[in-house]
Amino acid sequence: MVIFLLNTFIVSTLLNSGKDFPIKMLKDIKNIFIRIIKKTISFDPELIKVISLFYENGRDDGILHYINFRFCQFIYKVCHPFASKKNNLGYYFFKNKNLSLALSDIGKHMKDNIENERKQKKKRKKINEYVKLTNYSFVTIPPHQQQLYFDYIPNTLLKKLNFSLEKSGLFAECSKIMNTNFTVSQTRAWLFFTSNNKNNVPIQKHYDMLPPGTLKIMYYQGRFTEDLPALTLHPINSNPVKIVGDDPILIFNSCAIEHEAPFPERIRPTIEITLTPSVKNSYEVIQAGYMAGNKYNPFLKSTSVISIMIAK
Ligand SMILES: [Fe+2]
């Protein structure tokens, strides 16, 4: 990886300061170089993705996450040499009474505080109230019109969720998909409202654009049927999978499985917990803010964003 980055730097430097070199020759070298690299890394689509991102946008966070992911997988394999059970589907339906209760309490809190949250949202104007932690990317696309986000879930409810996440054994199921341990990097909670307006568009088919190794835990409160599921997954090479039943909890690789969500029949609380690969499991539930994307550098800690008053 280091050699690759070094070579990339040399070639791009030569191209940028190419006054003393014949441009065509440099372009040929670059093309040959790219061909060699493509052949070398073609076995790893995750690596191709992060390198493309680096070339196209100059973003190095994907590369940092890739290094973190592979390193965590290596450590996991060393610590679990005989772990044979694997989940190649990329998704799993999880059931646990205590975890369901903790998630359901947050759902209830949201439904009981709709007006209050709307009032508070109007008062919050500063960016650091939308992205509450440092070292996070900023999402530029506004949330869906029919969704109301709750970034300030009471600490007692988050603590309860933290505790039940740890006790439930859910992370062990996540490890079967990605072969690594995890840490919670983001928690979003929102209400999804019904829509009678035919011009409103639900959540259409898409892949999430998150760093390598990321998994999502989804909780949908309510009763869901084949006719009106909470979510539909579209795994490659298999039939669509509808998320049905009472208060389902789903673990899934949202970057590898295309998914879509219809408008619900009644107000639907949703909780989304994003997991990032880590050397050891950490269950602390944090809310980075609904406009926060993913952690930029997985090796750095995040702290609260503090607004500074400047006297003129
Ligand atoms: Fe998504």
Image (cartoon, rainbow, N blue to C red):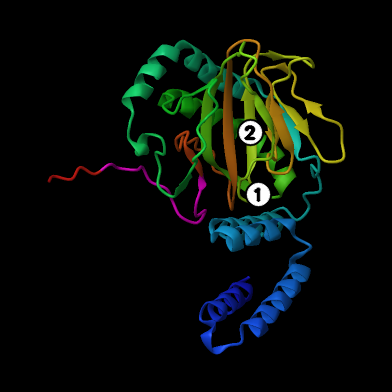
Against 32, residue 309 (above or below) is above
Whether 53 is among the magenta residues is no
- Residue at the limit of the structure toward the bottom, as seen here: 20
Residue 213: numbered disc: 1
Name the residue carrying label 2.
217
Instruction: State the extent of the magenta-drawn residues as a range.
Output: 294-307
- Seen from the viewer's position, the closer of residues 70 and 130 is 130
Provide the secondary structure element on which disc 2 rests.
Answer: strand
Q: In this picture, is 246 found above or below 183? A: above
| Residue 296 belongs to magenta span | yes
Q: Residue 66, image x and y in percent?
A: 62, 58
Q: Residues within 10 Å of mark 2 (few under 14, many from 20)?
A: many
| Residue 62 locus on image (x, y percent) | 58, 56
Q: Which quadrant would residue 22 be assigned to in this image?
A: bottom right
Q: Give the crowd class for mark 1: few <14, some 14-19, many >=20 residues within 10 Å.
A: many
Residues 66 and 140: in front is 140
Residue 93 point in image, percent of width and height: 74, 29
Query: What amino acid is found at the position of numbered circle 1 in the picture?
Result: Gly
Helix, strand or loop status at disc 1: loop
Residue nearer the viewer, 259 or 15: 15
Q: Looking at the image, which residue is at 73% across and 37% down?
A: 258
Q: Residue type at mark 2: give it.
A: Ile
| Label 1 within 8 A of ligand 1 by Cβ | no
At horizontal 66% and vertical 18% (from top left) the residue drawn is 247
